[in-house]
Image: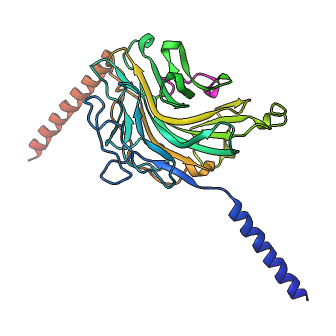
Amino acid sequence: MLRQSWCQMVAGAALLASFQVSTAVAALLAYDPFGVGGGPADYVAGSDATGVNVLAGQNPAIGPTAFYAGGWIQSGGDAQAVRDVGSLAYPNFPNAGGLVTDAVQFNCCSFGRSGREIAGGLGFGRDRRTIYQSFLIDFGTQGTDDPTQFGKRAYEMWNGGIGDSFLAVDLFVNSFSGVTDLTLQVTTPSGTQSQLVNGGGLTLDALAGTHLFVFRFDFTPMDSVNPLATTADDDRLLVYLDPTTSVESDYTPAAQIAINNSDLFITHHGAITNFTFSGGGHCPGKFDEVRWGDIFADVTPFGQNGNAGFTDCKVVDVPEPASLGLLAAGLFGLILGRRRATRCLGCRG
C-alpha cells in the first residue's frame, strides 16, 4: 500500500512537471541577421548611394515563424541598403551576416528610412500578449558637421504606413526639434507620451558605438466593464539598454511608458532612420541583428562569440602639433640608436 502511494505521488509530480513545462511560453519568433547570399533568407548586397540593390523590395524568408507580411518598403527617396561588410559587434553576443546603413550622398547628406510589415500587426486592444524585440544599433557620429543642421537619428515603428504621420514608437535624437538626448516617444490615437532614456544625458556623443536595445511590449486589452479602473489594463512599453545577460530581472528599464487606453498598434518596424543635411563630415548610423521572441532570453542569446565587428567610418584622433613633435623626436632617437648599434656591430666584425 505504501509502495502504491509512493508511485502515485511520483506519477503525480511527473504529471505536474510535464504540465508546467508544456505551459511555459518561450520561442524565438524571428531572427534577421541581414545575411548576404543567394538563399531564400538572404539579402542582395547593395548601395543606396548608387541605387543598386537597395533594401526596398527585398523580401527574405525570415523565420522561424511567418512573422512578416511582406518585404521592406522605402519611404520616399530615403534609400538604404544591406552592406556585406560584417556585422555590428557587441560583447559575448552572437552575430552574422551584414548590416543596414546609408552612404553619405552627394558629398553632403545621408537620408534613410525603410520599414517592414509585421503580419497582423501588434496590439490595438486585441489579445493579451507580451512580446520582446532586440536589435543592435549604432547611431553614428556628427563628426565635423554643423550640429544645428545635423538632423535625426532614430529607430522607428509605425501604425498604418511609413512616415512621420504614422509614427507609433520613436527612439531618437533630433537636432531639428532640439532633442539632443535620446528620447522614447509613443504615439497612439489617444495622445503622445515621451520619456528620456536613462533619465537623460545620452547625447549622440555619449551614444558613440554599438548598443543592444531590448523592447518589451505588454499588450493588455481594457476591461470592457470598467476600462479605467486599474493600471493593470494599460499597454506598456519597456526599454532595456545594453544588457549583458539573458535574465530580465537583472535590469531596470532605461525607459518605460504606459498607454492608458490600450490603443498602441504597430504595423511596421524600421531599421535606422537617418536625416542629415549638414555636410559630409559625419558617419551614418547602422542597424543589425533583429530578434523577436516570447521571453527576454529569446532575444538575448548571450554566451557565444560573434563575428568581427564592422570597423568602417571610425573617428581617428589627429595628434596635436606638440604631440607630433614628440613623436618625431622619438622616431629620430630610434633611428639614431639603430645606426649606432649597426656601427658597433661592424666594428666587432
Residue 313 pos. (x, y %): 34, 30
Residue 208 pos. (x, y %): 46, 28
Q: Residue at x 31, y 24 (%)?
A: 104
* Residue 108 drawn above or below residue 130: above
Residue 342 pos. (x, y %): 13, 39
* Residue 226 drawn above or below residue 305: above
In this rendered view, identify the residue nearer to me: 296 or 31: 31
In this orientation, does residue 209 appear? Answer: no
Does 196 appear in magenta? yes
Range shown magenta: 195-207
Does 136 appear in magenta? no
Q: Residue at x 66, y 56 (%)?
A: 25
In this orientation, does residue 348 appear? Answer: yes
* Residue 246 drawn above or below residue 168: below
Query: Where on the picture, by quarter, is residue 264?
Result: top right
Left or right: residue 259 versus residue 82 is: right
Q: Residue furthest front?
A: 225
In this rendered view, identify the residue nearer to me: 85 or 169: 169
Q: Residue at x 33, y 21 (%)?
A: 319
Q: Residue furthest right?
A: 1
Magenta stretch: dominant secondary structure: loop
Q: Quarter holding the N terminus?
A: bottom right
| Total numbered badges shown on the rendered structure | 0
Q: Residue at x 40, y 12 (%)?
A: 146
Q: How is the image coloured?
A: rainbow
Residue 244 pos. (x, y %): 57, 45
In this rendered view, identify the residue nearer to me: 314 or 270: 270
